[in-house]
């Protein structure tokens, strides 16, 4: 799934795209170091932001631990290009998603 959203920023309108694509992530103590998306490896150059949310479908009786989603906004890229990417890690499924990309 891909959806474009325009956001008024410091330098005009910045276009971000929502993806929700599964990615493979190499991490160090939970922090993303690089990820593979569409057959390309993107090295994380710096972490811009990090925050944690709770999954909306959590029911205390069903799962003993609170399922978190850890969001990482990173500057990353390949040899040819770089950009800003938002990675999402679901702690229950241990799945990583590419949530959003900014051009």
Image: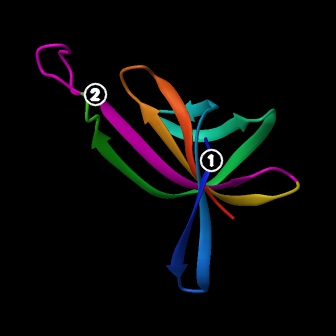
Rendering coords of residue 29 (x, y %): 47, 33
Quarter of the rendering containing residue 5? bottom right
Outermost residue to the right: 80
Residue 83's tag is: none
In this rendering, the answer to whether 63 lies above or below 40 is above
Rendering coords of residue 33 (x, y %): 62, 41
Q: Identify which residue, 87 or 45, lies in the foreground.
A: 87
47 falls in the magenta region? no
Is 64 displayed left or right of 30 in the figure? left
Where disc 1 sits, the SS reads loop
Cα–Cα span, label 1 and label 2? 25 Å
What residue is at 88 percent from the left and 56 percent from the top? 80
What residue is at 41 percent from the left and 30 percent from the top? 90
Which quadrant of the rendered structure holds the N terminus? top right
Say how many tags the image has.
Answer: 2
Q: What range of the chain is rendered magenta? A: 58-79
Query: Residue at label 2?
Result: 67
73 falls in the magenta region? yes
In this rendering, the answer to whether 87 lies above or below 5 is above
**Mark 1 or mark 2: which is in front?**
1
Rendering coords of residue 38 (x, y %): 77, 35
Query: Residue at label 1?
Result: 2
What residue is at 59 percent from the left and 62 percent from the top? 16
Outermost residue to the left: 61
Where disc 2 sits, the SS reads loop
Which of the two discs, 1 and 2, labels the residue nearer the N terminus?
1
């Amino acid at each position: 799934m891909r959806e474009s959203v325009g956001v008024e920023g410091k330098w005009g309108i910045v276009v971000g795209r929502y993806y929700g694509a599964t990615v493979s992530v190499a991490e160090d103590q939970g922090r993303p170091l690089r990820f593979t998306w569409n057959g390309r490896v993107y090295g994380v150059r710096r972490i811009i932001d990090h925050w944690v949310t709770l999954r909306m479908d959590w029911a205390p009786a069903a799962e003993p631990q609170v399922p978190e989603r850890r969001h990482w906004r990173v500057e990353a890229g390949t040899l040819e290009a770089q950009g800003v990417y938002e990675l999402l890690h679901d702690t229950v499924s241990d799945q990583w998603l590419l949530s959003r990309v900014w051009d």
